[in-house]
Amino acid sequence: MRSSGSPRVGRRRAVLRTAGAALSLAMAAVLAGCASANTSTDSSSSGSAFKPVTQKNASQITVWADSTRLPSVQAYQKSHPDVKMKIVTYDGSADGSTYLQTKVQLFDRTGSGWPDVVFGSPTDVTWASEATKSGAQPFAAPLDDKLVPQSTLDGFAKGSLTPCQFNGHTYCLRNDIAQVVLWYNKNLMDKWGYKVPTTWEDYEALGKQVAKDHPGYLVGSVGDTNSHESYFWSGQCPAFSLTKPDTLRSDLQDPNCTKMAKLLDGLISAKAVTTKGFFSQGFAKDSGSKVLMAYGPSWYGQYLFKAAFKTPSKQVAAASPLTWKGETTAATGNVGGGVWMVSSHSANLKASTDLATWLTTSDENQASAPTYPAYTKAAEAWLANPVNSDYFANDVSKPFQEAANEVWTGWSNTKFPDATAWSSVVLPALTSGKSLTATLPAWQQEISNEAKAQGYKVVNQ
């Protein structure tokens, strides 16, 4: 997981008294590396076929989940008393933890100990879908290989399983997504006679108008460790685009990158977009009431406006993702989401797969989840739950559902988190007064350095 303001899926709602508490909840609710990667090949090139171990369907299954997912796993156990389960709580790969990978490597050496089902981040899938150094099959089982029906896999939001797909197979089920939409304060927009923008150009113009008419009010922030996912991912900037499983294209001089940087630089100069993070210390108290618009993930409504900013109900609304003028197809980013994997070493693949499927697709579990399910039917049940809709000034169903199918798959799921370079290079530069445009080369270089350290070939065009 990344850091401030990167909510992972699934934290149970709690009463939050401060912005700091909201940040802690958000950090516990979202995973890092929640990107997509369209790098799969035909199954014919995927190497040796999956060979399950001897199945003992009466055996106990071991489940590893973080504390956020624990109630869901316990609910499954309660509703399926015939399934013998051992539940282990671990960090769930939060904050970039490599605990799961380290333990699996140990189990690979000793030949035992693997959990049957694990919750983790999409970044975990990058190593869990690879054969071990000894040539043994990957830790994660290929779920599309006679485990999960294709009809079920087809039921996930468009592109949401892309981070799970490598070498022609699907190695995980997506728990939730955090599609980016345009949030706005409907009361203030109506009061001031502003029209909700539908294009980036309109957003830019309105931001500059707001800065002139209502100084101090904001239309966005680039100061959180996931801000680049809201803006540059949504703008289809090829900062993290895997052209092959071992080759990363990072071209921040691509027009999609430079025009987004230029747009944001103009709004930063006008003081309509802040370089302070929405989740930074003191922001909620000092400026939370002056956020007119925010381009960010679907969890912003509950975790940013309601919990951190304490914006009264029936004021905040959501609109569909923005497009550049002339575009016919919308694209948006994603800021969060976790996955469930089934171990290829499991001696009870049936029970393990049933659990992972129930956790991700069942209305019983997902309708009450605090963040948006990746499975389309479960998302409909989630949207129908008043807990997820009553706070807002409009029906968020349409923009949420549209955005869920418009997440750009060109921002890839890599072996390293996409937030590190942004946090270590870009945010300090912005704080010192440098422009985004001037910082693009340094950002690209840091991404390249991290990628090469992980064994990737890097191309810049």
Image (cartoon, helix red, strand yellow):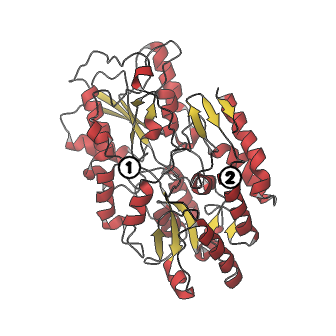
- Closer to the N terminus: mark 2 or mark 1? 1
Give the residue displayed 47% in from the left and 31% down from the top: 40
Q: Quadrant of residue 415?
A: top right
Q: Residue at x 26, y 40 (%)?
A: 151
Q: Position of residue 86 (x, y in %)?
A: 32, 32
Q: Position of residue 30 (x, y in %)?
A: 50, 49
Location of mark 1 (residue): 157
Viewer-proximal residue, 423 or 406?
A: 406
Q: Mark 1: which amino acid?
A: Ala
What SS does tag 2 mark? helix
Q: Is residue 90 visible?
A: no
Is residue 341 shown left or right of residue 280?
left
Please identify the quadrant where the N terminus is shown: top right
| Residue sitting farthest toward the left | 82
For mark 1, give the secondary structure. loop
- Residue 357 to residue 265: above or below: above
The local crowd at label 2, few if under 14, some if 14 to 19, many if 20 or more residues have their Cα within 10 Å, is some
- For label 2, the residue is 255
Around disc 1, counting alpha carbons within 10 Å, would you say few (fewer than 14), some (14 to 19), or many (20 or more)?
many
| Amino acid carrying mark 2 in the image | Pro
Measured Cα–Cα span from mark 2 to mark 1? 28 Å
For image coordinates 19% across by 38% down, the residue present is 81
Horizontal side of 227 relative to 372 (left or right) equals: right
In this rendering, position of residue 459 left or right of residue 380: right
Q: Is residue 78 above or below residue 405?
A: above
Q: Would you say residue 54 is visible in this rendering?
A: yes
Instruction: Residue 71: give x, y in percent of width and height.
Output: 34, 47
